[in-house]
Amino acid sequence: MKAKRFVSFLVASVLILTSAAAVAARADSRDCRYFKETGHYVCGQYLEYFNARGGLEIFGFPLTEAFDDPTHGGLRVQYFQRARMELHRDGSGSRIMLGLLVDELGYTFPAVNPDQVPSSNSPTQHYFPETGHIVSHAFLRAFREKGGLEIFGYPRSEFFYENGVVVQYFQRARMEWYSDRPPSSQIELANMGEIYLERFGLPGDYDEPAPPPARKGSAAAASPTDAPPVGAPTAGAPEDCKYFPETGHHVCDAFLDYYRAKGGSEIFGSPLTAPFNDPDHGGLRVQYFERARMELHPDGAGGHQVLLGLLVDELGYTFPPVAPDQIPATNTSRQRYFPETKHVVSHAFLFAFREKGGLEIFGYPRSELIYEDGHIVQYFQRARMEWRPKNEIGSQIELTELGRVYLERFDVPEVHRRPRPRDGAAAGSGGAGPSTVIKLDLSASVEHPITGPEGTQTIFVHVVDQQGQPVAGAEAAAQVRYPSRQEQVMLPATDESGFTRKSFDLVPSPPGQKVVIEVTVTYADLSGTTQASFLPWH
């Protein structure tokens, strides 16, 4: 028994070490594509087949790494949401074939009755004597256009009604028909790869997410100090940057192109950090915005592409899948079920999803619409939508500041978050001077929240700019509103820390009646107001 345990441990260790080495090799290979949605690579012949035979529409995202599968005769296989690719070798080389998932899952149906077999095949129906079933109409069109026997295998049923959808089974796939779509996209493939793995599992840990590839030219655990000067405009190309005085950061080059092309401030908000190489995300070059994290990924062709981080997933917002009896029978313009995450998107949320970027911007849904913090909201992998019914139709959905939530929860070094003046020098680092003040943020308080009928009170005022930096030289005036009269108190200009204070004599007032102090602050052509209060008592 001890010998068997040792052998099992040794085999498992070899599998794990081999898998880790393979991931490291893949991360440096140009013949690979990394899918951050599921955390897996597709490489070599698997990637060639994926690209040539329909990509995401046919296969979905990878669910495992490629591995030698002892449950299938040692074949090298890789599982996807909708398929299993198998590398078959013969005397002339090797080729990819798709596994017969439907057959292995045991979905079998009686052959069609002899009196229903068509006398001849036509453009709208085809009888397959190999399995005794007919394929017709939209199913036959999809079968012919999307890969035929190679992709689907022979039919295992006729089309029939199942769980609210018209479906047809093939040896390698299950087709689902959605009548409200354009004819060329009415057929959707079910996630048979997911179903297979849920039922049979894996002979190892090959479904564990792999680390993303390192940014070209940097180590996987690159230090932020290895990056170009953070926050500064690109050397020699200031026209490729935009400075955001609201937060004190630049957005440049590929990030700026993406920002402008995909919705600007409505989708992303303002930048909260400089761009930097992030060791917590495999050395990827990233930049945080109020509502998103942009990531620069190798595109497999020697260049790079910008993708958005899965902030909701990383923040751990998960919700149970929709109940089976709430899954719509068909997708419509007002509701859509996403089998990938088992949630429904509907009404204004679906309209915003389609109009503002779809999967690229939001990812798959992670919840249904729910009531949270006084608003109706819905979570997606990359965003949280809030419904604001008082807004105009077409703009009722607003995105919340998940980028800010992420930075508040996780530790991003302060050097990347520190605001910078327009020339790129860090604020407070001896640069060219403070950034432009475009907004005042005020707070006011009193020394004694409860007072006697006589005596003195002190009002404190603090003024910072849009970046949270203190504003010196701001003028402040306080209007003290007693129940019987008003008194004006002028405060000194704010100091280098943005503070000012003033003590004043109290006016006798009835006990228990609140006294409100309204503070007005001016700086250059800017002004703002805030309030404080106290309660007279005997």
Image (spheres, helix red, strand yellow):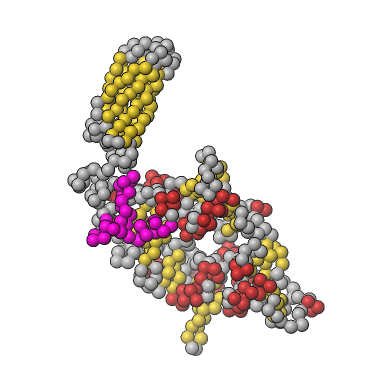
Q: Relative to residue 329, is residue 299 drawn left or right? A: left
Instruction: Specify the segment rendered in magenta.
Output: 233-262
Q: Residue furthest bottom?
A: 91
Name the residue: 38% across, 19% down.
481
Q: Relative to residue 25, is residue 131 drawn left or right? A: right
User: Is residue 318 shown to the viewer in this render?
Assistant: no
Q: Quadrant of the C terminus?
A: top left
Q: Position of residue 485 (x, y in %)?
A: 38, 14
**Is 19 placed above or below 501 here?**
below
- The image quadrant that residue 310 belongs to is bottom left
Q: Relative to residue 465, is residue 200 drawn left or right? A: right
- The image quadrant that residue 107 belongs to is bottom right
Q: Residue furthest right?
A: 115
In this view of the protein, which residue sits in the foreground, 314 or 427? 427
- The image quadrant that residue 513 belongs to is top left
Q: Position of residue 367 (x, y in %)?
A: 55, 51
Q: Position of residue 74 (x, y in %)?
A: 51, 77
Q: Position of residue 413 (x, y in %)?
A: 31, 49
Name the residue: 31% across, 36% down.
526
**Is 10 placed above or below 325 here?**
below
